[in-house]
Amino acid sequence: MSRREIHAVAQLGPIHLSDSKEAVVKRLVGMLREAYGRGAKWVTFPELALTTFFPRYLYDTPEEYDVFFEEGLPSPAMRPLFEAAGELGVGFYLGYAEKLEQDGRTRRFNTSVLVGPKGEVLGKYRKIHLPGTAEPIGDPEFEHLEKRYFEVGDLGFPTFETPSGRFGMCICNDRRWPETFRVMALQGAELFMLGYNTPTRNIHHPEAAHLREFHHRLSLQAAAYQNAAWVMAAAKCGSEDGFAMIGGSMIVAPTGEVMCRAATEEDEVITFDCDLDLGAYLRRSVFDFARHRRIEHYGLITSQTGVEVPE
Ligand code: CDT
């Protein structure tokens, strides 16, 4: 049996500080329409897809950085994308900076939303593995201040029933952590959607340029194979006001193979005819979790964060 469906990944080229959200959303709607024209039922857009990757900049007051955040779903800026999706019957994943009032305080998260083919909200994910620092390191070339602007996500790794199957979402640095995908796979996720903004230079430690994309691809291929699921990975990339980020948007099959990959570091739609049942044989055999997982030996995964060498 096969459950084939065309999926799209819509990579974004740079968004500069001077670009308006309105102009960006026009680009997103254009790519949604292009994906629809190629028969796609779902589109994955990048992380923080409405603005430049603002956590690279140091701001001190909410008055300075709230311009990057969205309130409500759809927020006014997103509305044309929701309308186009509903009109065309195409679902999508979109990363954005979320601001809300809750329990008498203002909360901010690095969030993605899953919107169904009728333009309806199916669910949200709030980024859990926030990289970087809360305080500046003092080198503008390597600042990455996600911990300053966002709280750690409070929704866990939920999965969502869609007309096409069960999907899960994660965001950028989450892909480097195998726990992210396993928790979603344990809930039956067959497809993971992921947006990212990955600086071309490692913010933590100098390393060879080719390793940046290698580690990205390695994480996705391992996640797909070890969880027998599809991965849709969408970059925001190219040079944003002189800050370079990797491309390498791709669609990875449950076999761990890269089925297609963006060729540019600009706005680019890639599509693939995905069989959502391709991973079924893996889930019945080598990755039949119920038969083969040995949770009695995995306790440290949830009881301990850092390395503790036994006596
Ligand atoms: N946006 C984001 O999460 N970027 C991080 C940079 C950290 S570099 C180890 C990423 O994982 O790509």
Image: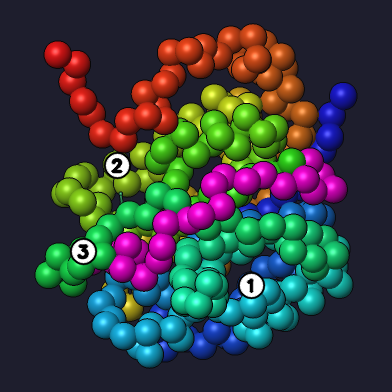
The amino acid type found where label 1 is placed reads Leu
Between 50 and 242, the residue placed more toward the observer is: 50
What is the spatial separation of the Cα atoms under label 3 and label 2, in whole angstroms?
17 Å
Crowd class of label 1 (few under 14; some 14 to 19; many from 20; radius 10 Å): many
- Residue 224: horizontal and vertical position, in percent? 57, 32
Q: Is residue 96 above or below residue 257?
A: below
* Disc number placed over residue 142 in the picture, else none: 3
Can residue 12 be seen in the rendering of this structure? no
Instruction: Check disc 1 and report the residue beneath it.
Output: 28
Magenta segment main secondary structure: loop
Q: Is residue 113 above or below residue 295?
A: below
Is residue 263 part of the magenta span, yes or no?
no
Q: Residue at x 54, y 24 (%)?
A: 226
Nearer-N-terminus badge (3/2): 3
Q: Residue at x 68, y 74 (%)?
A: 73
Q: Is residue 95 above or below residue 212?
A: below
* Disc number placed over residue 211 in the picture, else none: 2
The amino acid type found where label 3 is placed reads Phe
In the image, the residue with mark 3 has its CB under 8 Å from the nearest atom of ligand 1: no
